[in-house]
Image: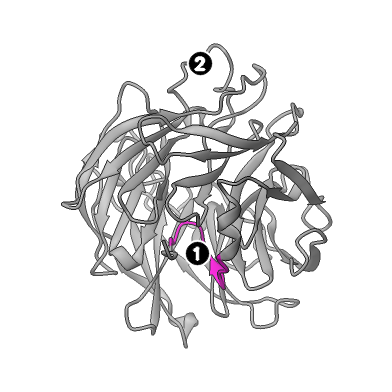
Amino acid sequence: MHSANVTHVANVPPQAPLDGPQAWGTDLAFQGDHVFVGNYDGFSVFDVSDPTRPAAVSRVLCPGEQNDVSVSGNLLFLSVDSPRGGPACGSEEGRRGSDEGWEGIRIFDITDKAHPAFVSAVRTECGSHTHTLVPGKDGDEVYLYISSPGPEPESTTCPAPHDNLSVVEVPVKDPAAAKVVSMPKISEEKDEESLGGCHDITAYPEKDLAAAACFGDGLLLDISDRPHPRVLQRVHDEENFSIWHSATFDNAAGKVVFGDELGGGVSATCDGATPENHGADAVYDLSEDRKLTLRGYFKIPREQQPDENCVAHNGSLLPVPGRDIMVQSWYQGGVSIWDFTDASAPREIGFFERGPVEGVGGSWSAYYYNGYIYSSDITKGLDVLRIDDPLTDPARKVTLKELNAQTQVSYPE
């Protein structure tokens, strides 16, 4: 199923060695004519110089849930949030809660994209569920803001209270020297039975701002001092939100969209039994004095089956001057393109979805890059879509050299 303005132009199904029983496709990153696709069992590199015919450049076996991916120059970073026997790709699966299990960030050199090379790794408290790449101001370092849930009872590697994130500093010319340089407290203290930490953070370095989805609330952060982000405001939504999952700024940094991953991504929350503002997006205005004010909600208007996992997930802004439009994944709810220019009345303008599959499936991440939408489907592989619509066509005039969706860059208005 798809709207008349959306065309499915390509699919690359999972292939060995990344085609095991839980070799789920996860996040995406982009650089030049290449797209990097995370997978629970490693990552893939595709040449998309012709987006209608993606060509595999390499597939790297390196197990570690979730293997969310970002790229910067010749470096690639993977998030690992499941215990391993060690940081090497060949390490065995570890035991959760063990003091000896390794979790954190793996770093690869991708100078030769056909043969990515493991460089080093950094262990982080509670592992790395996701990470956000933030360039340093002098160009000599990049910083990774590490998000992870916790605490874990009786664990020395993820102790209570887990009310912080980890900041990893990576010297660009010496990535093997990467290390944790700070662990700023950004959440309110939780009791030992509750989740702390954050799920996802989106940075807007040009504005010295970041928006963090931290399980129980959403945060606005000042990141002018890159290694030491600090909280400017905390917003709650106990009536409609369950798991604050992700965030997206508009181009002017005058709005923030927060998403709620009700059910953790494995539940059916787009069915007729779930309220329309649950498992949805919330649109906030962001004033010049850096205050967030709730304006409206958005949820895909197509009711899903009661056995289809569906909820708001990863998305990115389209570079459309004068309008606020983003593309977003909804697991088995598919890919949605929606307009939040009017924050109080957002609306869908296009979509693509496959229909029900058995078990957990659907689009994990959907991002716009240089004229096309790329979607990482959990079980079906890499999808490439095109939207042809007067509202979105101006975005084709913008060409990026690199895109990590959680590291927003401005485009000309």
Cα–Cα span, label 1 and label 2: 36 Å
The residue range painted magenta reads 398-408
Relative to 27, 196 lies left or right: left
**Which quadrant does the N terminus fall into?**
top right
Residue most extreme to the left: 289
Give coordinates of residue 331: x percent, y percent: 62, 36
Q: Is residue 161 visible?
A: no
Q: Is residue 390 magenta?
A: no
Q: Residue at x 29, y 63 (%)?
A: 207
- Eyeballing the image, is 305 above or below 359? above
Residue type marked 2: Thr
Q: Nearer the viewer, residue 112 or 94?
A: 112
Query: Which residue corresponds to mark 2?
Result: 274
Depth order, front residue of 181/144: 144
Between residues 86 and 309, which one lies in front from this camera angle?
309
Closest to the camera, between mark 1 and mark 2, is: 2
Q: Quadrant of the C terminus?
A: bottom left
Please say whether residue 138 is visible from this viewpoint: yes
Q: Main secondary structure of the magenta part?
A: loop
Residue beneath disc 1 = 105
**Earlier along the polypeptide chain: callout 1 or callout 2?**
1
